[in-house]
Image (spheres, rainbow, N blue to C red):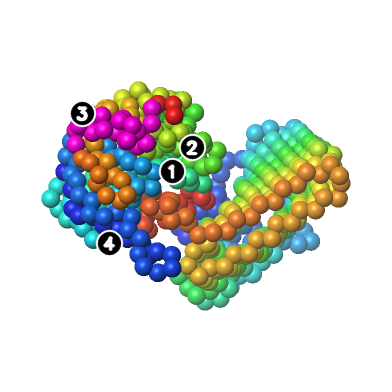
Amino acid sequence: MLELQHISFEVPAEGGGKTKILEDVSFTVSERFVAITGPNGSGKSTVAKIIAGIVRPTSGKVLLDGEDITDLSVTERARKGISFAFQQPVRFKGITVKDLISLAAGTKISVANACAYLSEVGLCAKEYINREVNASLSGGELKRIEIAMINARSTKLSVFDEPEAGIDLWSFNNLIKVFEGMYERTKGSILIISHQERILDIADKIVVIADGKVAQIGSKSEILPTLLAPAGCRYTAKEGN
Amino acid sequence: MAQLDSIQQNLLEQVADIHEIPEGAFSLRVNGQMFDSRSSENIEIVKKTDKPGIDIYIKPGTKKESLHIPVLLAKTGITELVYNDFHIGADSDVTIVAGCGIHNGGSEKSEHSGIHSFFVGENARVRYIEKHYGEGDGNGRNVMNPTTVVEMEKNSYMEMETAQIKGVDSTDRTTKAKLDEGATLIVHEKIMTHGKQYARTYFEVDLNGEDCGTHVVSRSVAKDESKQEFISHVNGNNRSSGHTECDAIIMDKATVSAVPEIMANHPEASLIHEAAIGKIAGEQLIKLMTLGLTEKEAEEQIIGGFLK
């Protein structure tokens, strides 16, 4: 189980003082699917980066299965079972799709196995396996490769920052199937930052973050109606929007 | 034939990816002297009489043959200048593997300078692979200064892959090429320097014939306090296409200078130059660290991929 306890994060403000990005954010992730939603700029991605160890909180603690991991590095957290799919995947000159999937799996995997991960995210494995993860790949292709890497890792906690962005041609149904398959394999938790109703719809728990604070936490049946009501509809988008 | 010792065998493996004397035509130079050579039916190797080096004659129409010409220096204090001329017959298709490995266990400088001249006949295709490698536990410097001169006839094609990854303290590489009608020259250079090493590469390509073209691509990594200079001149003297690119990763206190120059002397010359120098992107390191790699392992993967 992942637990965030009273996480705050501040950055120096222009012209002196400090700007609060996150304030007293606390929630747990022990369910199958947990979604974080909220308006743009509310601090959702910062929460994901704090979980992965890329950003250190100003105060508060991050616990994984009861262990305080607040001071652990990105590498140490990854090795303890946290995976993180970036909102904007990174390009590498010379490193191939197979190289990245092998690194993710932590072992030299066979071409057949690497291909299986790619097929699962709807990429024709033969065409992609030896391609460089460079500027020749589209944003949508990179997002799917990013998801395939998380699948190859199969850790107890997988964090996705807006996985649906740029993959519209592939459809949400398939993305949801991938998440379901991932859960079957790992029996761990999957934390997804998303605006999409279709993704929120599979969540066992939804955390709404607004203005750097937890605005609401609850089950899908408790939260979704409030998000879709006129006052809250700015948080979510229907498919295709 | 005399046998190679283990140091020499290791050097051979590093520069030519082979463990022993290869099949087909070869010429092996060890410690400043011709060690052994063998011609094949289509590839004739003739030792020069007026200066050190060899003439290589590849018969027109020779297909799918390879030639290995490694040079090994395993003694300290050797300085040599070797001239190798390659006469590549029309319509042939050959692979040439050159390379120089130095093991300098002493305190004196070891230096190999090779001047390779290629005369590539009409419609001929050549793949030329050249690796430079240095090692040794002494304080002696390993120096390699290769010069490659290429003359390409109508519709010929040449691909050069050069690599210097380790152990060469100082290098000054010069490549000059003249292309006739329809000829194509592709160059892929890889360089990694560390410690206080120095590497300079200079390219000059004259696109003389109609519809000839070139790509000169250099990728390099400069670590520690090493220095690198990349200079290229691509001259479009006819309707032709040229592209020169230098992409460098800089680390520690290294310095890199890139000067890609293109000159159009004909209104239908189409020329592009690119140069980029920068450190490893922080997000690349972080991405690999989220896969469980340490920062150092991530750096090694990124450099390994970049120079692959």
Give x and y (percent) for residue B306.
51, 50
Picture disc at residue B138: none
Q: Is residue B60 visible?
A: no
Quarter the N terminus of chain A occupies: top left
State the residue at coordinates (80%, 53%): B263
In this figure, which residue is indicated by the disc labeled 4? A58
Quarter the C terminus of chain A occupies: top left
Left or right position of A96 against B99: left
Left or right position of A59 against B27: left
State the residue at coordinates (55%, 49%): B16
Q: Earlier in the sequence, mark 2 or mark 3?
A: 2
Q: Earlier in the sequence, mark 4 or mark 3?
A: 4
Picture disc at residue A88: 1
Q: Secondary structure at mark 2?
A: helix
Disc 1 crowd rating (10 Å Cα; few below 14, some 14-19, many 20+) is some
Vertical side of B26 occupied by B81: above or below: below
State the residue at coordinates (48%, 45%): A91
Name the residue type under label 3. Answer: Ser
Name the residue type under label 2. Answer: Gly
Q: Secondary structure at mark 1?
A: loop
